[in-house]
Image (tube, grey):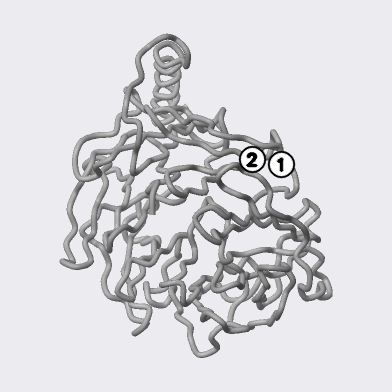
Amino acid sequence: MTQYFKNSIFLILACLTIFSCEREPGSGESESGEKEYKYFLLSALGSWPNTVHYMTATNDLTKGEMDITKEGDEINSKGTYSYIVKNGFIYNYKTDQGIFKKFKYTHDRLTTVKEVPYTYISDITSYVWIDDHTLVIVGDTGDGQHIRYTVFNATDLSIIRQGEIEGFQPFPNAYNFYSLGAMTYMDGQIYLQYSFRNGKWLTPEYYNFAVIDYNTFKVKNSITDNRSSGVANGSPYFKTTFTKDKEAFYYTCFPRAGAGTSDIFLFRALKGATSPDAGYQINLTNLVGGKPLETVIDYIGNNKMVVLYRDPALGDSYNGRYAIIDIETKQLVRVLDELPGDEPYEQGMFVQNNKLYIAVNTNKGGNFVWIYDQQTDKITKGMKLPNSISGFARFDKLYD
């Protein structure tokens, strides 16, 4: 047993003791923490499958410290960390219980606001907000051959409507299952990536792009794009697409092993179009020097996006690097090499008011929030974050 593993197990047991003995709901203690929070962090302790996740929150990322031995809540027993976040609430599909939940993180506890029985899809493959109170989730039926949708009223979790999306292209030879990517909503239409796969999860050397009428959930148009294979990951665990100013949908393609080129491309579809913009593409892999990209990108404003990639020059671990790319000139603007090497987990950054906030898990100098201000092109160190953890599973804002 390695010393790292011993330390991780000790920290898990210590945290469980603190929360079970001192923070048990209904124990009569006064409430701690704040009623409302702006930002939250999910820290992962231990190694899969013995991983425990803790949620902590703050209203100021520029100073202070998050300490999971003194604050926060263990969340594994309450739901997955596949979080859809809007207006201060968290939405989560706990598939093993067949429940769709609405949470609120308040007074340092993740509290259930509402839950409803739900088993219509096997899991959330992709989702999109139509407005502040209308959420669409999409997934398959478990057999991979039918794609269903549900439209939720986010206020009370009532189902507005649901059914099967009709009109996808038929399965090609040797591929008998759907592979869904990310989607967005613009002006009455849903734009959705999808592909096909076989039983070994291999895909053809192309992907498909569908334009779907939101009122009927019927495919209006579907095209095959052979510029890349693979699709973005549209689940709440990752962020591999963005919609700019509600006018253009930018999305990546992540090819699977054995499905052709390994380069990661960025494509786009414009509002009102029936197919992707054939004249627009960026080879993101080439822009970062051929290094492997992680499954996280975001738009930071002023025609700039951020990507996360692995730089082997930093070593076998803690080698995550962040780079800024201009999506109009299609050029690398700069690498945020002021930051220590990161060991990214899943979704450890977000954007607010043209500033990029990154939760960096490093082996040098401790873990902190780092803040990149695009207007000044400066990076500052903010709040101290938990050390001796596996990684940060999710770092995000609770309000847009």
Which part of the image, by quadrant, shows the C terminus?
A: bottom left
The reply to whether the C-beta atoms of the residues labelled 1 and 2 are less than 8 Å apart is yes
Q: CA distance from mark 1 to mark 2?
A: 6 Å
Instruction: Please provide percent x and percent y for residue 235.
Output: 57, 55
Of callouts 1 and 2, the N-terminal one = 2
Q: Image height check: is 250 above or below 272? A: above
In which image quadrant can residue 115 be found? top right
Tell me which residue sits at (15%, 66%) in the image: 376
In which image quadrant can residue 61 be found? top left
Given residues 296 and 35, the one toward you in this image is 35
Left or right of 49 in this view: 383 = left
Given residues 387 and 143, the one toward you in this image is 143
Q: Image height check: is 101 above or below 234? A: above
Label 2: few (<14), some (14–19) or many (≥20) C-alpha neighbours in 10 Å: some
Tell me which residue sits at (33%, 66%) in the image: 300
Instruction: Please provide percent x and percent y for residue 374.
Output: 23, 66
Instruction: Please provide percent x and percent y for residue 393.
Output: 45, 44
What is the three-letter code of the residue carrying label 1? Tyr
Left or right of 67 in this view: 208 = right
Residue occupied by mark 2: 100
Label 1: few (<14), some (14–19) or many (≥20) C-alpha neighbours in 10 Å: some
Res. 396 in view = no
Tell me which residue sits at (39%, 26%) in the image: 7
Residue 146: which numbered mark, if any? Answer: none
Instruction: Please provide percent x and percent y for residue 357.
Output: 30, 53
Report the number of discs: 2
Tell me which residue sits at (42%, 77%) in the image: 286
Residue occupied by mark 1: 118
